[in-house]
Image (cartoon, coloured by chain):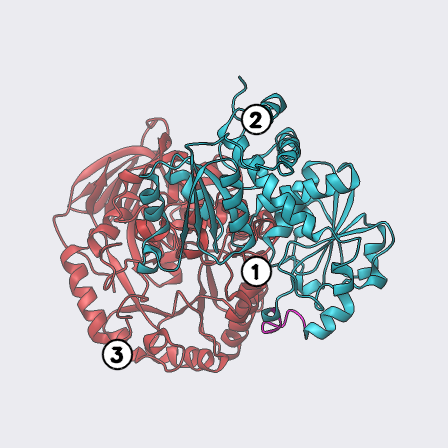
């Protein structure tokens, strides 16, 4: 269930290169929207250079920090950031204070989203009470109250026994589980990917096997219980291999990668900038290439920002004292366009599909499509726009971006979500 | 007048080979001043050197403090305990508070990597990293280079076996970079659990057997801490000592032995080695003083041997 502040529905027409991988569209056309619904798609002889109209994006993994840390993000600011990033739907994680583990907390959030969410917003609930990894939440009641999926994101479900029960019981709620895969016995104390860079810097290493081992465990349990799983923010090449094998064996698995894991490596940590600190940590160039390979062949079917706002004073600290996480909603497309599309590593239509239809399918949300009769969920993109990421230009309340100061190519010009223009440059 | 080559000394990466050699040459010139009756030089009179120490340290703090005093600078020591740091003040705020006194140099020791860089970014003082986490301890590496050069007469091609807990050692990381910078050859010797995965990418050889010591000119022994057993890095200190302890039998004639201190006698180093003629351990402490004087001097004055010579004339 998605919730947002219902307002007017807009009418507009846009002439651009229309690219919709789901509908098989790619060519200059004029798309007409009347009262929030696509009413006509007429091919045009040409389109303004660099402009692409695509189905708007869906982010399966956002931290809105509400309730509890409204100084870092609110539903209003986080969804405004999403609108500026080209998103027509986002899904919020439940690791808030309090944790979203009861229907009353969830219902209050949905109510607030109806008042202040700029784009349709879904909420996930925790797998375990308090995300403590001990007892299951009341999944059926939470699903009825609107939970999109269940996740203990931010921490793994360490107990294999509880994970097995969660998988089996999730059938009652009929919602997928979204899993943060981390064997904490291996990652404990880790500050960055364990490898040549951590060896040189002297930062405690976080071995990539801490992720891939848990991916293997969870895929094994998902196969055994014959339940679907959604794997969050994969970072290791070995994890991609494991997902590929499991899918061939018939396991129903979807998987995310973040723009930062697809575009950057642990070399970024040499700056000692706390905005290069994420969970999971940035991997090696081999890991990055494996993720890109997975994105190309569909093993990775979702790009998720894992947008994780943090207060400036918390990130403005020595690396080891700073919290994990970076923002991403407002830079995702530009980063992917700059580092993957323009470099020739990934075709534009693959990036667009993994930003929109892929995550929508994984979390069973409506797939945004550019088709007559469909609600308008559109992202107008300028592939050639050059801009510099500046701390004071974010709509998010936080500015802990790994891209601060970098010049990127590609920008979101306009976003239409649920028939309403929610962002225009 | 040549531009100052380094504004800060945050890590060995801040130095070129010329910078390192110039500092060692200055240290050598300054060392002669230590033999005088009046050991104080007027060079940095009126300058303020702040020692900001977030970790307990005896030898590094006293060495920096004395180095600054020998150059006639004013010094101030701030320790983490009993200061506003205990009240939760952030490192940046502490740095900004100190900056209000307009110090010329801030020497910082901190348990976390990048702390020295953060202070350098926040203030206009010259910053010297006196140890940040397990990252860097550049003045230790420079004093070790100085000690080796004085003892062996050269650095180029010298093989230095660094033995012990490399994983948790900022001394080892700085020393590896410093040795590579001046053309020496670091070889790491440690149990596999205490060798950081991927460390060989820095350009050093790696070994897990103590026999590797045989072809080294210098045996550099790292401190082995008892808490390493809690995380199962080694089964016991007893077994560590049996496999990697530096005993007289393992030191070949002509080799010299070094240790950054404080030593665990009978653990990583046999007292008979520590107190033998092959040991340069007390020389290292004396080198520490002159090298830190040279570093302060280098940051606060135009570099160059001619200038270093003039310092001594003034004295």
Which residue is located at x 33 percent, y 66 percent?
Answer: A95
Q: Residues within 10 Å of mark 3 (few under 14, many from 20)?
A: few
- The Cα atoms of the two marked residues, 2 and 1, are separated by 54 Å
For label 2, the SS is helix
Nearer mark to the viewer, of 2 and 1: 2
Where does residue B14 sit, x and y in percent of width and height?
Answer: 56, 36
Where does residue A171 sit, x and y in percent of width and height?
Answer: 38, 78
For label 1, the SS is loop
| Image quadrant containing the N terminus of chain A | bottom left
Q: Residues within 10 Å of mark 1 (few under 14, many from 20)?
A: many
Colour assignment, chain B:
cyan
Q: Chain of mark 2?
A: B
Name the residue tied to disc 3. A141
Name the residue tied to disc 1. A208
Where does residue A299 sit, x and y in percent of width and height?
Answer: 52, 57
Nearer the observer, A160 or B58: B58
């Amino acid at each position: 269930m998605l919730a947002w502040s219902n307002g007017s529905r807009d009418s507009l027409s846009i002439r651009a290169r229309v690219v919709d991988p789901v509908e098989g569209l790619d060519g200059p056309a004029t798309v007409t929207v009347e009262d929030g619904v696509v009413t006509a798609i007429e091919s045009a002889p040409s389109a303004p250079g660099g402009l692409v109209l695509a189905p708007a994006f869906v982010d399966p993994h956002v931290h809105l920090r509400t309730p509890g840390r409204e100084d870092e993000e609110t539903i209003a600011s986080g969804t405004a950031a999403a609108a500026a990033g080209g998103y027509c739907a986002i899904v919020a994680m439940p690791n808030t204070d309090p944790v979203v583990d009861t229907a009353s907390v969830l219902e209050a959030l949905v109510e607030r989203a109806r008042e202040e969410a700029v784009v349709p917003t879904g909420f996930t609930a925790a797998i375990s009470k308090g995300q403590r990894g001990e007892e299951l939440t009341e999944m059926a009641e939470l699903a009825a109250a609107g939970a999109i999926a269940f996740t203990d994101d931010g921490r793994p479900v360490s107990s294999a026994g509880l994970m097995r029960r969660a998988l089996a019981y999730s059938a009652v709620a009929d919602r997928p589980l979204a899993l943060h895969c981390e064997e904490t016995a291996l990652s404990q104390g880790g500050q960055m990917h364990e490898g040549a860079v951590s060896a040189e810097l002297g930062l405690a290493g976080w071995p990539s096997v801490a992720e891939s081992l848990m991916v293997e465990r969870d895929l094994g349990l998902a196969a055994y219980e014959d339940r679907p799983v959604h794997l969050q923010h994969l970072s290791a090449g070995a994890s991609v291999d494991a997902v590929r094998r499991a899918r061939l064996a018939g396991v129903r698995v979807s998987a995310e990668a973040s723009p930062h894991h697809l575009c950057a490596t642990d070399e970024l940590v040499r700056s000692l900038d706390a905005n290069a600190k994420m969970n999971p940590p940035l991997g090696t160039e081999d890991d990055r290439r494996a993720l890109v390979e997975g994105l190309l062949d569909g093993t990775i079917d979702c790009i998720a920002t894992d947008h994780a706002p943090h207060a400036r004073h918390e990130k403005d600290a020595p690396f080891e004292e700073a919290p994990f996480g970076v923002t991403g909603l407002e830079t995702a497309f530009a980063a992917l366009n700059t580092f993957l599309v323009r470099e020739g590593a990934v075709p534009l239509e693959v990036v667009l599909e993994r930003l929109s239809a892929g995550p929508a399918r994984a979390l069973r949300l409506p797939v945004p499509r550019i088709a007559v009769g469909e609600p308008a969920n559109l992202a107008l993109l300028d592939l050639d726009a050059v801009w510099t990421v500046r701390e004071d230009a974010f709509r998010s309340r936080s500015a802990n971006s790994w891209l601060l100061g970098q010049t990127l190519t590609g920008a979101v010009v306009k976003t239409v979500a649920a028939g309403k223009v929610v962002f225009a440059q | 007048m040549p531009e100052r080559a380094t504004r800060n000394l945050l890590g060995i990466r801040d130095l070129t080979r010329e910078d390192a050699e110039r500092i060692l040459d200055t240290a050598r010139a300054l060392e002669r001043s230590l033999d005088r009756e009046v050991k104080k030089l007027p060079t940095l009179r009126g300058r303020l050197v702040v020692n900001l120490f977030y970790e307990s340290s005896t030898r590094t703090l006293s060495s920096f403090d004395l180095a600054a005093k020998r150059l006639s600078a004013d010094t101030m020591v701030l320790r983490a305990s009993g200061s506003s740091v205990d009240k939760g003040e952030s490192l940046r705020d502490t740095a900004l508070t100190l900056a209000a006194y307009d110090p010329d140099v801030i020497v910082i020791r901190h348990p976390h990597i990048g702390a020295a860089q953060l202070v350098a970014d926040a203030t206009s003082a010259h910053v010297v990293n006196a140890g940040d986490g397990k990252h860097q301890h550049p003045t230790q590496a420079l004093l070790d280079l100085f000690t080796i050069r004085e003892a062996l007469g050269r650095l180029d091609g010298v093989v230095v076996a660094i033995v012990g807990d490399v994983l948790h050692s900022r001394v080892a990381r700085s020393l590896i970079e410093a040795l590579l910078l001046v053309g020496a050859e670091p070889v790491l010797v440690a149990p596999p659990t205490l060798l950081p995965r991927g460390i060989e990418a820095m350009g050093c050889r790696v070994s897990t057997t103590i026999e590797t010591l045989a072809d080294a000119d210098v045996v550099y022994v790292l401190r082995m801490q008892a808490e390493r057993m809690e995380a199962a890095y080694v089964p016991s200190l007893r077994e560590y000592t049996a496999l990697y302890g530096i005993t007289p039998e393992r030191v070949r004639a002509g080799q010299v032995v070094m240790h950054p201190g404080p030593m665990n006698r009978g653990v990583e180093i046999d007292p008979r080695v520590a107190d033998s003629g092959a040991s340069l351990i007390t020389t290292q402490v004396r080198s520490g003083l002159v090298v830190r004087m040279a570093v302060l001097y280098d940051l606060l004055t135009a570099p160059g041997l001619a200038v270093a010579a003039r310092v001594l004339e003034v004295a």
